Amino acid sequence: MKKVIINENERGLLFKNGRFMGVLTAGKYHTYGGKTIEVVSADKLVSSANCSLNDLLKNKQLAQMVKVVEVPAEHILLHFADGNFSGALLSGRYAFWENGRKREFLLEDMSQPEVSDTVPEYIFHLGRLSTQLYTRVEVAQYNKARLYFDKKFVRLLEPGTYYFWLSNTNVEAELVDTRATQMTITGQEVLTQDKVSLRLNVVCTYKITDYIKIRTEIDDYTEQIRSAAQLAMREYIGRNRLDDILANKDDLSKYVFDRLKEREKDMYVEFSEAAVKDIILPGEIRDIMNTVLVAEKRAQANVITRREEVASTRSLLNTAKLMEENQTLYKLKELEFIERICENVGSINLNGSGDILTQLVSLTSKHSE
């Protein structure tokens, strides 16, 4: 004989000689004569290590004490107990003990991959729903996403968070940046009208205007943009001389920009800017241009030097005329001259009589000699 105690939150499954006989509620029991009691939790699904659920449900007593739910194929059943999410069940037959708890069930069709709005979003953050059952797609504020089911386009997703059931349908979300995008386009080497080889780098800024057609009707739209810009550069370079190109970079930028604007509708983008970034010349041409530039700068320096010399001479001439006409100014200039010389003279000795200024002039004159 064996004593078995069943608590309030438990149930006992009574077996006799391996055959299920009924359900025991809370209390103390003794087993004998081939009887056994399997104690199970009343808060969990009805199950037994000794008997299948279908065999248990054949017992009328047990059938009246449980709630049975059926989950069809390709469906998922979300179970809520007393308003709280309790778990998810896939296709099959399940039974719950009637233990006074308020149970609610939400049946979702997984053959429709997108999780419906009736499913509370919080259940995906609890960690109690396996990530093997769903996938999450995050679309940032500066993104949109093209949604595909089994490689077939479904719709465009706006910024937000989306959940999809993992089933036989393959779900893909292709993110697209809605911000202005900058592209640097490197041109090929092209001959100018005067047969000089050069290469240009252009920077353009664009935004996508149709996120669906740019994917379904154009093969690699970035390559289309690059080709359109390169063709525009070739056209302009081939029709102009090197000096004109270097002198009119703004005209070249405008030409490329106008050509790109003409292709906007075909490429489903909107261009806001296109400008020449670099003009790359062959090494020998760069050396020649550097030589010309140095010669020009030297010529400009010589002109400035000559101009300054003429201005200095003219100033001296004007000063001489003024001193000739004004003796006081002459004396002041003479004193200024003496002052400058005295800055470099250690000492001065004056002897005899006479005009001190005359003697100073005489001494400093001798000193300067």
Image (cartoon, rainbow, N blue to C red):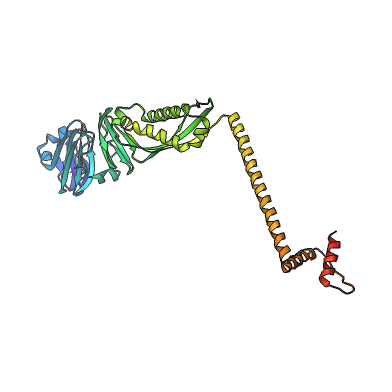
Q: Return the x and y of residue 128 as percentages of the image width and height.
A: 28, 43
Compared with residue 61, is residue 317 higher up or lower down, i.e. above or below? Answer: below
Quarter in which the C terminus is drawn: bottom right
Residue farthest toward the front in the current orientation of the protein: 325
Q: Is residue 127 left or right of residue 226?
A: left
Name which residue lies at 41% across and 27% down: 227
Q: Is residue 232 left or right of residue 120?
A: right
Marks counted in the figure total: 0
Q: Return the x and y of residue 77 as percentages of the image width and height.
A: 19, 38
Q: Is residue 170 left or right of residue 344?
A: left
> Foreground: 205 or 345?
345
> Foreground: 222 or 17?
222
Compared with residue 76, is residue 28 higher up or lower down, i.e. above or below? Answer: below
Q: Return the x and y of residue 102 as percentages of the image width and height.
A: 15, 48
Q: Return the x and y of residue 23 as percentages of the image width and height.
A: 15, 41
Residue farthest toward the right in the current orientation of the protein: 352
> Foreground: 350 or 288?
350
Name which residue lies at 15% across and 32% down: 55
Quarter in which the N terminus is drawn: top left
Q: Is residue 216 visible?
A: yes
Q: Is residue 1 visible?
A: no
> Foreground: 106 or 292?
292
Q: Is residue 282 left or right of residue 102?
A: right
Name which residue lies at 16% across and 44% down: 104
Tell me where residue 360 sits by quadrant: bottom right
Name which residue lies at 33% across and 30% down: 267
